[in-house]
C-alpha cells in the first residue's frame, strides 16, 4: 500500500509535544496536589494545610501585591514611552523600539545579575532596601513586555478620530480619555496580562536582588520541591495556576467588553 502524505500529519509533533509537556505536567500537579505524601491515597490534607497556615496566605498576598504594583508601574512608564515611539513623526522610531526591547534578548539571570551589581554600585543593596530593589528589578525585566503590545496597538490607531474629537471641541485631556485610551485598551489589557502573570511565578528576581529577604510565591513552591515535598508543592503550583487562569479570564472578558464599545465621537 502506497503511503500518501496528508497535511494533518504535520500536527503530530505538536500533539506529542502538547501531551508530553502540557497535559502530563498538569496531570501530575493535580495528582500530587490531592494525594498523601506517604501513602499516595486521595486526600484534602494539602488544601487544609495551605489555608490553615497564615504564612502561606501571607506569601500569596505579598506576591499578589508585588504583581499589582509591578503591573501598574510598568503601565505608567510603558504607556507614554509606547505612545512616543508610535508617533510617526519620530525619526528612527524602529531603532528606538529595538533599543527598548533589547533586554528581552539577554538571558534573564544575566539581566538580573547586572541589575544587582548596578544597584549595589549606587548603594541600593538587597540587605538594606529589599522591597525597593525587588520592585526595580521587576519593572526593569518586565517593562519591554509592556511596551511591545502597547506600541503595536498604538500603531494601528485611527488618528483621524483624535483629530475629529479636537475639531468637535475636545481638549487634549478629553481626547485622551474618550478616544485614545479606549482605542489602546486592548494593548493595555494584553500588556497587563503579560506582566502580572509571570510576576506571580517569579522568584529569581526577588531572590537575587533582595538577598532572599523578599519571599514570593514562586520561591515557596521551589522550596517545597527542593525538599522533595512534591505533594504540597504541587498544591501551591495548582493555586498559582488557578490565579493565572483567573487573570486570563478577566483579561479576555475586558477585551470582549471593550470590543463591543463604540467611540462617542
Image (tube, rainbow, N blue to C red):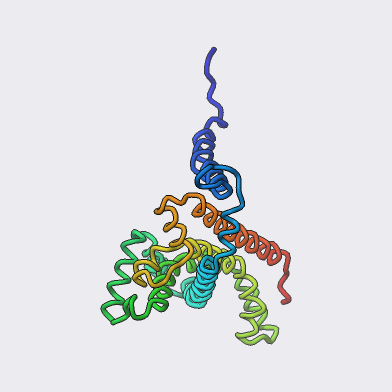
How far across and how far down the image is residue 171, in percent? 63, 87
Regarding residue 245, the answer to whether it shows in the image is: yes
Looking at the picture, does residue 35 appear above or below residue 74?
A: above
Foreground residue among 127 and 110: 127
Out of 82 and 124, give the one closest to the viewer: 124
- Pick out the residue farthest to the top: 1
Residue at screen point 51% across, 35% down: 16
Compared to residue 66, the image places residue 109 above or below, namely above
Q: Residue visible at 42% across and 77% down?
A: 131
Q: Quadrant of residue 208?
A: bottom left
Give the left or right position of residue 245, taking residue 128 as reference: right
| Percent of width and height locating residue 226 | 39, 53
Q: Residue at x 60, y 62 (%)?
A: 247
| Residue 191 in picture, x, y percent from top left | 53, 66
Residue 87 in sight here: no
Q: What residue is rendered at 31% in x and 62% in y?
A: 110
Amino acid at each position: 500500500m502506497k503511503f500518501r502524505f496528508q497535511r494533518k500529519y504535520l500536527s503530530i509533533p505538536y500533539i506529542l509535544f502538547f501531551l508530553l509537556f502540557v497535559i502530563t505536567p498538569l496531570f501530575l500537579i493535580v495528582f500530587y496536589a490531592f494525594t498523601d505524601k506517604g501513602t499516595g491515597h486521595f486526600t484534602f490534607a494539602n488544601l487544609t494545610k495551605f489555608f490553615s497556615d497564615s504564612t502561606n496566605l501571607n506569601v500569596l498576598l505579598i506576591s499578589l501585591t508585588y504583581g499589582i504594583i509591578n503591573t501598574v508601574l510598568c503601565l505608567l512608564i510603558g504607556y507614554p514611552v509606547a505612545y512616543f515611539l508610535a508617533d510617526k513623526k519620530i525619526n528612527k522610531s524602529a531603532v528606538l523600539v529595538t533599543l527598548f526591547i533589547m533586554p528581552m534578548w539577554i538571558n534573564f539571570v544575566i539581566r538580573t545579575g547586572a541589575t544587582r551589581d548596578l544597584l549595589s554600585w549606587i548603594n541600593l543593596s538587597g540587605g538594606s532596601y529589599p522591597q525597593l530593589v525587588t520592585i526595580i528589578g521587576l519593572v526593569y525585566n518586565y517593562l519591554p513586555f509592556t511596551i511591545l503590545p502597547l506600541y503595536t496597538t498604538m500603531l494601528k490607531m485611527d488618528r483621524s478620530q483624535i483629530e475629529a474629537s479636537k475639531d468637535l471641541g475636545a481638549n487634549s485631556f478629553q481626547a485622551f480619555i474618550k478616544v485614545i485610551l479606549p482605542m489602546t485598551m486592548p494593548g493595555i489589557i494584553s500588556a497587563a496580562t503579560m506582566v502580572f502573570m509571570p510576576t506571580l511565578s517569579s522568584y529569581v528576581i526577588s531572590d537575587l536582588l533582595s538577598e532572599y529577604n523578599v519571599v514570593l510565591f514562586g520561591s515557596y513552591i521551589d522550596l517545597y520541591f527542593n525538599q522533595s515535598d512534591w505533594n504540597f508543592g504541587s498544591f501551591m503550583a495548582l493555586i498559582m495556576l488557578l490565579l493565572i487562569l483567573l487573570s486570563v479570564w478577566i483579561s479576555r472578558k475586558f477585551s470582549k467588553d471593550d470590543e463591543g464599545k463604540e467611540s462617542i465621537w
